[in-house]
Image (cartoon, coloured by chain):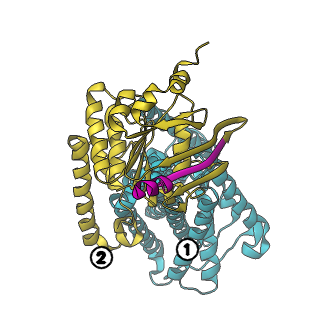
Amino acid sequence: MTTELLNVSMPELETRHLVKRFGGMQAISDCNLRIAGGSITGLIGPNGAGKSTVFSMISGFLRSDGGEIWFKGRRIDGLPAHRVARLGIIRTFQTPHELRELSVLENLMVVPRSQFGESLAGLLPFGGRRVRKEEHEIEERAIAVLRTVGLEHHAQHRAADLSGGQKKLLEIARCMMCNPKVALLDEPTAGVNPSLINDLMEVIRVLHNGGVTVVIIEHNMNVVMRLCGHVVVLDRGAVMCEGTPDSIQRDERVLAAYLGSPP
Amino acid sequence: MLDFLIAIVTFTAIYAMVSLGLNLQWGQAGLVNLGQVAFFATGAYTAAILTRANVPFLWAILAAAALAAVLGALVALITPHLREDYLAIVTLGFAELVRLILLNEKEIGNGPNGINAIPQPLHGVAGANYPLLFALLTLAALAAVFLFNERLRGAPLGRLLRAIRDDESVVASIGKSVLAFKVEAFSLGAAMAGAAGAFYAAYLTFIAPEMFTASVSIYVLVAVLIGKRGSNFGTLLGAVFVSILLEGSDFIKDYIPFGTGVQIAAFRIIVMGAVLMLVVLARYRTMVES
């Protein structure tokens, strides 16, 4: 009982009174999210509710106009994107952002931080052996991640040549390669062939079982119901309600938000 | 004839170093730079002033490269979020700024009169064969720049720069500072242009602001474009094409039955413009397809 109370009072990731305006439009107003460590939380809501905007603000890609973002007892709003990522909060992009001219394998090999081969010292003649050893280790890990998402046969292909669904898998693979503490997945199944969706859900479960807190924006309610332990409904930039998938599905306000209120 | 060939080789090697610097910035990291001449000029003036003060040529090259690198880092630091087209305008304007300062500040390099009597390295060692010796020195420097660029291209660092070129938001999302790598790439490319400037000053023994107009930036841009952006070997070929077109027309004019020297001088610019358009058209189509 005590631990549960503790969990409720200390979420791993939290937004407090978050505000974002685009010109005159209030995209996010007083948004309060509480993400428990180790959970899979679904973030749903009608188009334009501000789901992706919240992700962008948490991950440091977008500055908030008010409110606070806390991660593990540390205030992170105002940090640049790469600093947020270094804390272990990794976002994926709604439209896949593959590194087009790089191979699928290289897309993952760029991920590990402070590579000796990425320093100028690594270019010096005596650095060759150390760089090769490092590259070998990174490549092994990248191939293991590609195997998890089923892209190992495409390792040498140009990322631009992947199909839309494969690019989505590559987004998640890159996220995995980062060893995240929190994964913010922005519509991982949108535009993916239905036959691939089960594989994708399995990949997300693998990510979660590795101890990662997952927050997922998703329109496919079937996926939300099967994956998420907790669902937050966003409407017009604020949290409308939250709870278990079952309770959300029965909530009349949610139905009204999606379908329009009855006359 | 042989003298002329040696002169062409020297010019080509100098232009190739400037072009390779641009290829590192633009071809690898995707940083458009229409002001490469600014770093070339910085290097030329730095080396000219230092060698006239009896600083050894090798130190003058290093100082030229270092000062150009610092300027390059500054440009990269003030433009971190600029989109390609805006970066092009800022760098173009920056180069004009540098040229205007050189033109108007009498203290730096005698304003419009420029700097003359620039000492040449190892002069007197080779006697009448000096131009050949200088060409070989320049080629050695070019070889060093080329090998460095090739090593970088094959290294994880090159991979990361190409990742920034493809999509810098991805690089930020995996926790890497895009700005730090942009500054690094930009100042390295500027350093190469700076070193080339040192050779330019020593070769001509005279420099003036009028030699460092925006057209130089465009020539090296053409060299990189012709050689397929990103390829160091292609950039080398592109630089050969551009220098032969620019410096070789004096030679060709004896063999062309029509036109005066002035007409041919204008004609070579037309040829370069046409080639540039053809290359862009061909490349642009492949870009749209992919």
Mark 1 or 2: in front is 2
Secondary structure at numbered mark 2: helix
Is residue B141 in the magenta section? no
Residue at x 23%, y 67% (from the top left corner):
A133
Identify the chain of the residue marked 1, using the numbered disc in the image. Answer: B
Secondary structure at numbered mark 1: helix
Residue at x 67%, y 49% (from the top left corner):
A66
In the depicted structure, whether residue B64 falls above or below residue B285 = below
B230 with respect to A131 (left or right)? right
Residue sitting nearer the eye, A1 or A183 = A1
What percent of the width, then of the height, locates residue B11? 50, 61
The magenta region covers: A1-20
The answer to the question of whether label 1 and label 2 lie on touching residues, with beta carbons closer than 8 A, is no
In the depicted structure, whether residue B108 falls above or below residue A87 = below
Count neighbours of disc 1 (C-alpha within 10 A) and say few if under 14, some if 14 to 19, many if 20 or more.
Answer: many
What percent of the width, then of the height, locates residue B278? 49, 34
Residue sitting nearer the eye, A109 or B19 = A109
Q: How many marks?
A: 2
Chain B's colour is: cyan
Chain A's colour is: yellow
What percent of the width, then of the height, locates residue B150? 36, 60
> Mark 1 — residue?
B66
The quadrant where residue B77 appears? bottom right
Q: Amino acid at mark 1?
A: Ala
**Mark pair 1, 2: CA separation:** 23 Å
B103 with respect to A231 (left or right)? right
Residue at x 68%, y 40% (from the top left corner):
A21
In the depicted structure, whether residue B131 falls above or below residue B169 = below
Most distant residue in the top direction: A263
> Mark 2 — residue?
A126
